[in-house]
Amino acid sequence: MKTLKIAIQKSGRLNEKSVEILKNCGLSFENYKSSLISTVTNFPLEILFLRDDDIPEYVQDGIADLGIVGENVIVEAGAEVTYLQKLGFGKCTLKIAIPNESNITGIAQLSGKAIATSYPVILEKYLKDNNVDAEVRTISGSVEIGPGLGLSDAICDIVSTGGTLKSNGLKPFSEVMKSEAVLIGKAGSDLLPEVQELLQRIRSVLRAKE
Ligand code: ATP
Ligand code: ZN
C-alpha cells in the first residue's frame, strides 16, 4: 500500500481544526509542536506540517498527495490542484475597505487610487473583471495601516469580524472573495484507493457535524 502524505498548516488559524478533523477520522498520530512530519500509526499516511503558503505548491507538484488550506491561499498561489472537499472551517472574506471618511461610493471611483494588499493576484483579477484601473501595492502584513500612513487610499484584506478594520478607521466597501479551508489533491489524476477511503471518512465526519 502506498503511504500518502497530507500537508496541513503547522501553526496558525487552520492548524487546530485540521488536526481535529484528521483525529475525528480515526487517525492516530502524535502532534508534537516541534515535529515537521508525523506518521499515522493506523493508516498509510504521513502528515507534513508546513506554512500554509507552501501547501498549494506541494500538492500541485505531487510532493504531498493531499493538503488542507484556505481557498484564498490556493487562488493567490495560482496553483493547479483539485478541490476535493470544502471543510466548513477557516471561513473568511477578502474585502476592499476604505477609510471611514472616504467619499468613494462606487467601485469605478477606485480607478487611479492605490490599494494595499497581501493578495495582489486575487485583487488584480477582481479589478480587471470590474474594469477598474487602480494601483496595487503589495505589502506582506498589517495592510490596515496603509491608508493611515498615506500609503494607499484603500486596502484589500481578509475580514472576519471587522474589528481590525474598525480599530484602524476603515469600513468595508466591497467583497472580493469568500474563502474557507478545503481539502485539495493533485489535479488531473485518478484518486488512489487510500485517498478515496480518507475522503469518505472526512465526508462522514462532516455529515455527523451537520
Ligand atoms: P503561516 O504561518 O502558516 O503562513 P499565516 O499567518 O499566513 O500562517 P493564518 O493567519 O494562520 O495564516 O491564517 C490561515 C488562513 O486562515 C488564512 O489564509 C485564511 O484562509 C483563514 N482565515 C480565517 N479567518 C481569518 C482571519 N480573520 N484572518 C486571517 N485569516 C483567516
Ligand atoms: Zn501564510
Image (tube, rainbow, N blue to C red):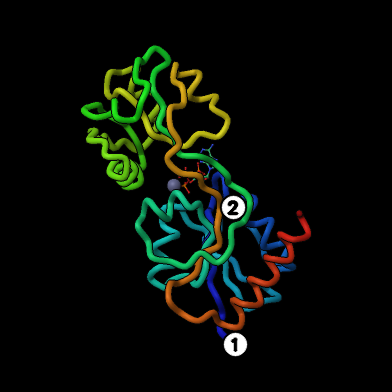
- Residue in the picture at 40% in, 32% down: 96
Which numbered disc, 1 or 2, marks the residue closer to the eye? 1
Q: Is residue 122 left or right of residue 135?
A: right
Q: Are marks 1 and 2 in contact (CB under 8 Å)?
A: no
Q: Amino acid at mark 2?
A: Lys
Number of residues whose C-alpha sits closer than 10 Å to that of mark 2, classed few (under 14), some (14–19) or many (20 or more): few
- Residue in the picture at 68% in, 65% down: 203
Secondary structure at badge 2 equals: loop
Query: Which residue in the structure is indicated by mark 1?
Result: 1
Q: Amino acid at mark 1?
A: Met
Which sits in the foreground, 104 or 19? 104
- x and y, in percent, of residue 9 in the image: 53, 54
Q: Is residue 152 above or below residue 207?
A: above
The tag earlier along the polypeptide, 1 or 2, is 1
State the image quarter where residue 155 is shown.
top left
- x and y, in percent, of residue 85 in the image: 58, 63
- Residue in the picture at 58% in, 46% down: 90
- x and y, in percent, of residue 170 in the image: 44, 20
Which sits in the foreground, 62 or 11? 62
Query: Which residue in the structure is indicated by mark 2?
Result: 33
